[in-house]
C-alpha cells in the first residue's frame, strides 16, 4: 500500500514540478489526438449525415458495418496501416512509418466509425417534422440537411468528444505506427507502457494521472452536452 | 380562379390506400375546411397540397399547370405554400431567427427581413416575444408565432393542420380571427383541418368532409359502427352502436361503418304515420346556426345531427329540451365499409 501511496505522491510532485519531458509527451499526445479527431470529424460527420439523409438499398447493412467497426482493435488498425505505409507497402514512398502522421492516419481510421455511428444516431433522433418544416419554409435539400445538422449539434459534438476520448487513450496504433521514439512520437500511453517495462512507476503514474484527468475533463464536457441535448 | 385541381390523386402507404381524391378544386382567396375523423387522410392531403409528399398516383394542377415532383421543379413551388403543423416545429433558436429563416432562404435584405418580421409579429400580437427562445413558448404562443412565420413569407396558400386543437379557448378565438384577417387582408388561400364544426362554420367558405381518404357527402359526426342483422330483398335491418334499430339498404349481413347524411334527415309532425320505420322521438340537445342552415343535435340513445334549412327550422321551431320526431330515410344512410 505504501508503494502505491509513495508512487502516487512522487507522481504528483513530478506533475507539479512541470517536468519538461512529461509535458512534451502530453503535448505530442494532445496534438496527434486533436488532429486525428478533426480529420475524422470532417469525414465522419459528412459520412454520417449522408447515410442518415439518403435512402438507399443496404442502408441498414452499412450502419451495421459501421457499428461492427466500433469494436475494431487498435492493433488490427495498426497492423493494417503498417502494411500500407511500410517500405514495401503501397504508401511506402511517402516515408510515413514512425512519424506523427502515421499515428494520425491510424487514429483517424479508428474513430471515423465512432463519429459516423454517433452522427447517424444524433441525426436520426431529430423529429422528422423538422425536415418538413424546413422544406415548407422553402429550404432546398442542402439547406434542409444543414438545418437538421444544426439541430443535432449536441449529439454530433458528443460524438466528436467521445472520439477524442478514444484516441487519447489508445496505445496499439501509437506503438505500432509511431514507434514510441523519444521526443518525436512518444505519446502518454506508449510512454506509460515503456516506463512500466523499465520499472519507472512514478513517471508512468504521473502520465496515468494526467490521462485520467484529461478523460475526466472530456467526460464532464460530454455529460454537459448530453444534458443540454436532453433539455 | 382555381389554384388547385386534383384529379384521381391517391396516396398508398404499405399497400393501404390512405387517400383517394377523385376530384377536388380549390379556388384562390377562399378559406376551406377539411373535416373528418382521425386517420381520415386530412393531414396527408395537406402534405400533398403543400408539396411535401408525393402522391402515389393522379395529377395535381397548381395554378393550372400540372405539378412535377422533381427536386428542381418542386422547390420554387414550395416557396408559394406554407404548411403550419398541428404542433408547429421551431428550430432551437429565437423567435426572430425562426421567422427570419424563410426570408433568408428567399434572399431578402436584412433591412427588409427586420421590417417583415416586425409586421408579422404585430399581426399576431406577439412582437414582445421576438427575442424569446421559440421552443419555450406555450401552445397558443407557438401556434401564433407559427402563423406569423408563415405570413412573413407572403405565401399564396397557407395550409393549417388543426390550428386550434392544442390551444386554450381564448387562443382558439384569437387564431380563428387571425386566419380570417389574413384571408381578408392578404387574400391568402387558407385550407385548414379541424374537428370543430363551429369553427369551420365560422371560418370556412366551403367545408369538405373526408373519411377513409375520400371526400364524402356528409359530416363525419353521424358516423357510426353498426351491424346488419337481417337482410331483406330491398331493405335490411341494422343495429347501430348496439342500441338503435334502423332499416337500411344493405347487401349482406355483418359489421359495417355507416354515415347518416344530416341534411337528409326529416323533422316530421308527430302524427304523420307514413314514416313508421326509421322514425324516432328524440330530445333536442343542441342547436346552432351554420350559414343559412340550422344544425340540431338530437338524442335518442345516441347523438344524431340533423341539418335543416332556416325556413324549415322556423316552421317547426324546436327548442332545446323539446321532444321531436325525426325520420331517417334508408337512402340517407351510406355504408362506408
Image: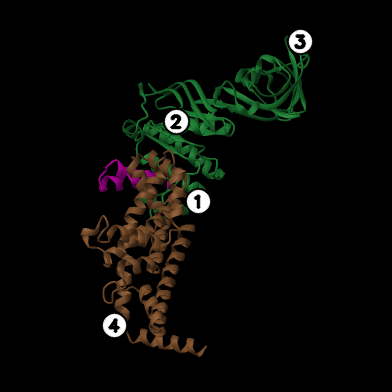
SS label for mark 3: loop
Q: Colour of chain A?
A: brown
Look at the image and say whether residue A66 sits in the magenta stretch. no
Classify residue B174 as left or right of residue B234: left
Q: Are marks 4 and 2 in contact (CB under 8 Å)?
A: no
Q: What percent of the width, then of the height, locates residue B47? A: 45, 33
SS label for mark 2: helix
Magenta span: predominant SS is: helix
Q: Does label 1 or label 3 sit earlier along the sequence?
A: 1
Q: Which residues are magenta?
A: B100-125
Task: Looking at the picture, tell me which residue is in the foreground, B97 or A221.
Answer: A221
Classify residue B129 as left or right of residue A26: right
What residue did someone put label 1 on? B138
Q: Are marks 4 and 1 in contact (CB under 8 Å)?
A: no
What residue did someone put label 4 on? A20
Instruction: Work out whether disc 3 and disc 2 sit on a shared chain.
Output: yes
From the viewer's perspective, is the residue at label 1 or at label 2 nearer?
2
From the viewer's perspective, is the residue at label 4 or at label 3 nearer?
4
Tell me the CA gap for discs 4 and 3: 109 Å
Instruction: Work out whether disc 1 and disc 3 sit on a shared chain.
Output: yes
Q: Does label 1 or label 2 sit earlier along the sequence?
A: 2
Position above or below: B205 against B144 = above
Letter of the chain in green: B
Residue extending furthest toward the left: A93
Position above or below: A187 against B120 = below
Q: Are marks 1 and 3 in contact (CB under 8 Å)?
A: no
Q: Which mark is residue B274?
A: 3
From the viewer's perspective, is the residue at label 1 or at label 3 nearer?
1
SS label for mark 4: helix
Tell me the CA gap for discs 1 and 2: 28 Å
Instruction: Work out whether disc 4 and disc 2 sit on a shared chain.
Output: no
Position above or below: B58 against A115 = above
Amino acid at each position: 500500500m505504501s508503494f502505491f501511496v509513495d508512487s502516487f505522491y512522487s507522481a504528483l510532485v513530478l506533475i507539479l514540478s512541470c517536468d519538461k519531458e512529461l509535458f512534451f509527451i502530453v503535448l505530442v499526445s494532445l496534438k496527434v489526438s486533436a488532429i486525428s479527431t478533426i480529420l475524422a470529424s470532417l469525414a465522419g460527420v459528412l459520412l454520417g449525415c449522408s447515410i442518415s439523409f439518403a435512402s438507399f438499398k443496404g442502408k441498414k447493412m452499412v450502419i451495421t458495418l459501421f457499428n461492427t467497426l466500433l469494436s475494431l482493435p487498435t492493433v488490427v488498425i495498426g497492423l493494417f496501416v503498417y502494411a500500407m505505409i511500410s517500405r514495401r507497402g503501397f504508401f511506402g514512398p511517402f516515408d510515413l512509418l514512425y512519424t506523427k502522421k502515421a499515428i494520425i492516419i491510424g487514429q483517424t481510421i479508428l474513430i471515423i466509425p465512432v463519429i459516423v455511428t454517433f452522427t447517424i444516431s444524433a441525426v436520426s433522433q431529430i423529429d422528422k417534422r423538422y425536415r418538413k418544416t424546413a422544406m415548407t419554409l422553402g429550404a432546398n435539400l442542402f439547406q434542409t440537411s444543414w438545418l437538421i445538422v444544426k439541430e443535432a449539434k449536441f449529439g454530433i459534438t458528443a460524438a466528436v468528444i467521445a472520439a477524442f476520448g478514444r484516441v487519447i487513450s489508445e496505445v496499439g496504433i501509437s506503438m505500432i505506427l509511431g514507434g514510441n521514439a523519444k521526443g518525436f512520437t512518444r505519446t502518454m500511453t506508449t510512454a506509460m507502457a515503456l516506463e512500466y517495462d523499465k520499472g519507472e512507476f512514478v513517471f508512468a503514474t504521473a502520465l496515468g494521472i494526467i490521462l485520467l484527468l484529461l478523460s475526466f475533463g472530456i467526460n464532464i464536457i460530454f455529460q454537459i452536452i448530453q444534458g443540454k441535448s436532453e433539455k | 380562379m382555381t389554384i388547385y385541381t386534383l384529379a384521381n390523386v391517391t396516396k398508398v402507404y404499405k399497400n393501404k390506400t390512405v387517400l383517394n381524391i377523385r376530384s377536388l378544386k380549390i379556388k384562390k382567396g377562399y378559406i376551406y375546411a377539411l373535416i373528418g375523423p382521425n386517420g381520415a387522410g386530412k393531414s396527408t392531403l395537406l402534405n400533398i397540397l403543400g408539396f411535401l409528399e408525393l402522391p402515389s398516383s393522379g395529377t395535381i394542377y397548381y395554378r393550372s399547370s400540372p405539378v412535377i415532383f422533381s427536386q428542381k421543379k418542386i422547390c420554387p413551388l414550395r416557396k408559394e405554400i406554407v404548411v403550419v403543423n398541428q404542433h408547429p416545429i421551431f428550430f432551437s433558436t429565437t423567435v426572430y431567427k425562426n421567422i427570419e429563416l424563410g426570408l433568408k432562404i428567399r434572399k431578402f435584405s436584412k433591412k427588409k427581413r427586420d421590417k417583415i418580421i416586425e409586421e408579422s409579429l404585430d399581426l399576431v400580437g406577439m412582437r414582445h416575444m421576438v427575442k424569446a427562445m421559440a421552443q419555450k413558448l406555450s401552445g397558443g404562443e407557438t401556434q401564433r408565432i407559427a402563423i406569423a412565420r408563415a405570413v412573413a413569407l407572403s405565401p399564396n396558400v397557407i395550409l393549417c393542420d388543426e390550428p386550434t386543437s392544442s390551444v386554450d379557448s381564448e387562443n382558439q378565438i384569437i387564431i380563428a380571427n387571425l386566419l380570417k384577417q389574413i384571408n381578408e387582408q392578404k387574400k391568402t388561400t387558407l385550407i385548414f383541418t379541424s374537428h370543430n364544426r363551429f369553427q369551420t362554420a365560422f371560418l370556412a367558405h366551403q367545408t369538405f368532409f373526408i373519411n377513409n381518404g375520400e371526400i364524402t357527402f356528409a359530416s363525419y359526426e353521424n358516423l357510426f359502427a353498426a351491424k346488419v342483422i337481417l337482410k331483406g330483398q330491398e331493405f335490411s335491418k341494422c343495429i347501430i352502436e348496439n342500441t338503435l334499430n334502423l332499416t337500411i339498404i344493405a347487401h349482406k349481413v355483418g359489421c359495417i361503418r355507416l354515415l347518416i347524411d344530416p341534411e337528409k334527415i326529416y323533422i316530421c309532425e308527430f302524427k304523420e304515420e307514413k314514416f313508421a320505420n326509421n322514425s324516432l322521438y328524440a330530445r333536442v340537445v343542441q342547436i346552432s346556426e351554420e350559414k343559412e342552415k340550422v344544425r340540431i343535435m338530437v338524442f335518442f340513445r345516441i347523438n344524431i345531427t340533423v341539418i335543416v334549412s332556416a325556413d324549415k327550422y322556423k316552421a317547426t321551431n324546436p327548442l332545446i329540451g323539446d321532444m321531436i320526431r325525426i325520420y331517417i330515410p334508408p337512402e340517407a344512410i351510406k355504408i362506408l365499409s
